[in-house]
Image (cartoon, rainbow, N blue to C red):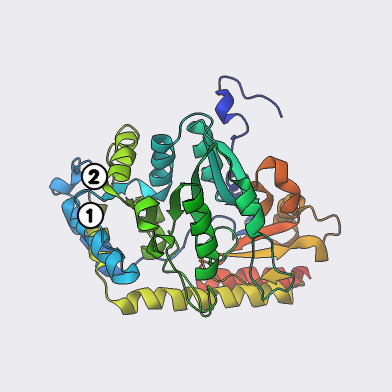
Amino acid sequence: MTRVPYLSARLQGFGTTVFAEMSALAVATGSVNLGQGFPDYPGPPEVLDVARAAIGTPHDQYPPGPGIPELRAAVASHVERFRGLSYDPDGEVLITAGATEALTAALLALLDPGDEVVLFEPMYDSYAAAVAMAGGVLRPIPLRPPPEPDGVWTFDAEELRAAVTPRTKLLLLNTPHNPTGKVFTRAELAVVAAVAMAGELIVLTDEVYEHLVFTGAGNGEGHVSIATLPGMRERTLVVGSAGKTFNTTGWKIGWICGPGPMVTAVRTAKQFLTYVNGGPFQPAVAAGLALPDDYFAGIARDLEYRRDVLVAGLRDAGLPVISPEATYFATVDVRAVRPDGDGLAFCRSLPERAGVVAVPTVVFYDPAHAHLGRHLVRFAFCKTDAVLGEAVRRLREMS
């Protein structure tokens, strides 16, 4: 690896992301971009109109450090409505600059140099960088793809238990999971919870896709927060976000909920990162969190339809695809069309071959385990009918 000048040793290896490379390829080749996971259609007017009305008012100025009281109360009410968990909005809810800041602030606040973090891979790419910035050490456990396309990703409970050492301080969980689309079942979460309690670990759980869950997911139980399991609320920080739920990824409004002393620790780190953000968007997100249940069920149904369109198109193009249980993403095993199984090379050639951009899953693995994801590629389906239709047409013509 070539050393980047001036960059600290902790961040060597975290250069320009593959997302930037693939997005540039999409522009250069006029390709349909199914690489980055952002919707290309607007959020609900009930949310957007509140933000428009807030611009030009005192909401343009700094909001309170923990977030406006209206939004903190809305988060607490929303979590209680959907998860049955009660949090004090004045001490157990913190508003952040998206989920990424919530996760990063938590890791900076809770880890000392050398502390170990157990997590599952493939993993969202900010996790490894945030652990590195905090001086922590990754202890990744592989999720294994199913043998059949309609199966689910799994993990080995013994590998999870063996990963915990006396230096392990925190377990980082992501469910629904990016990039695999896996929804951890209640039984799997019970295994994770038992490991956390046995090791006296803090659990940091990223649940930003909580409402984008499809029929039958999680062994038919849908999304379950690990904080709802016995003995887990007092050791768990739950991260959420408005971006995925309201198609407002650019607003960067997230939150973290948990026991007061833990949230206070996170706030201490967070106040020296962005301090505050998104003043006019905070009342808008508060309004969105109060929308009726039908809205949240509807966004899942809509995205499930988009998933099915892309999955059918990929299979028609001869690309074996693992149908996800949730999120924006479907995973393809490229070995059926590229015998060497080089997913990165496949993604670099796909814009010229088919006019479509995807992202190689290998970038979501610790470098030591890159071989586990070398043959996998991630496609996003959070796109309009026209965009998905064009992508599917191009992929079919490639076959």
- Foreground residue, 116 or 313? 116
Is residue 134 at all visible to an observer of this figure? yes
In the rendering, at what x and y percent does residue 189 appear? Answer: 51, 63
Q: What kind of element bears circle 2?
A: loop
In the rendering, at what x and y percent does residue 150 appear? Answer: 67, 76
> To which residue does mark 1 refer?
72
Number of other residues with Cα within 10 Å of mark 2, as a class: few under 14, some 14 to 19, many 20 or more: many
Mark drawn on residue 66: 2
Q: Gap between marks 1 and 2, in whole Å?
A: 8 Å
Extreme-front residue of the structure: 198
Could you tell me the amino acid type at mark 2?
Pro
* Point 49% across, 38% down: residue: 130
Q: Are marks 1 and 2 in contact (CB under 8 Å)?
A: yes
Could you tell me the amino acid type at mark 1?
Arg
Q: 234 left or right of 360?
A: left
The picture quadrant where one finds residue 73 is bottom left
- Foreground residue, 338 or 286? 286
Q: Which quarter of the rendering shows the C terminus? A: bottom right
- Mark 1 or mark 2: whose residue is earlier in sequence: 2
Q: Relative to 148, say whether 334 is above or below.
A: above
In the rendering, at what x and y percent does residue 65 appear? Answer: 22, 41
